[in-house]
Amino acid sequence: MSKCTFCGREEDEKTVFVGGYEILESCTDCKEEIEKEDKEMTFLDLLKSNLELDCDLIIGDVDMPASFVWTEEDKITDYGIQKYEEIMKSKYTILSNSNIEIHCENHILGADFCYAAAGYISSTEYEKIFVHD
Ligand SMILES: [Zn+2]
């Protein structure tokens, strides 16, 4: 018996690996769903896309304590990406009021990131995380 790790269906058939899941060959809907998810951008992709942002972030259903401002001159360093990896690799939704909801459960790390981005941290640490071109 094989099991689809995406939808949980069990069947006596071969499995294939798609985007980190092992799914049944007959799970064509799961395959589509996983591939669609894979194509969606992460928050890091958004930061790297040179968009100007000035909005509030919602992380783990919590409104973040500082608003988020990002310009095309702003860059996040590899150190910053590693430090906030959970947030960076999360998918996001831009809400109708232009605020951004990041699909990451870790709102504590989220708040930490927002305070850092707003400059409420030591300048030494800030300069390790962000670069302005
Ligand atoms: Zn499935």
Image (cartoon, helix red, strand yellow):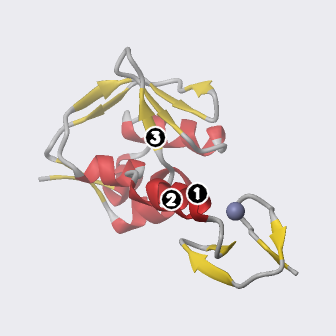
Q: Secondary structure at mark 3?
A: strand
In the picture of the structure, the residue carrying the numbered disc 3 is 92
| Pointers 2 and 1 in contact (C-beta within 8 Å) | yes
Residue 102, given in percent of the width and then of the height, sits at 50, 38
> Is residue 55 depicted above or below 112 in this figure?
above
**Relative to the observer, which residue lies in front, 116 or 4?**
4
In the picture of the structure, the residue carrying the numbered disc 1 is 29
Q: Amino acid at mark 2?
A: Glu
Residue 120, given in percent of the width and then of the height, sits at 43, 35
In the picture of the structure, the residue carrying the numbered disc 2 is 32
The residue lying at 76 percent from left, 82 percent from top is 13
Q: Earlier in the sequence, mark 1 or mark 3?
A: 1
Residue 59, located in which quarter of the rendered image? top right
| Mark 2 surroundings: few (<14), some (14-19) or many (≥20) residues within 10 A | few
| Mark 1 surroundings: few (<14), some (14-19) or many (≥20) residues within 10 A | few
Q: Amino acid at mark 1?
A: Asp
Q: Amino acid at mark 3?
A: Tyr
Q: Earlier in the sequence, mark 3 or mark 2?
A: 2
Residue 92, given in percent of the width and then of the height, sits at 46, 40
Of tags 1 and 3, the one toward the viewer is 1
Q: Secondary structure at mark 1?
A: helix
Q: Secondary structure at mark 2?
A: helix
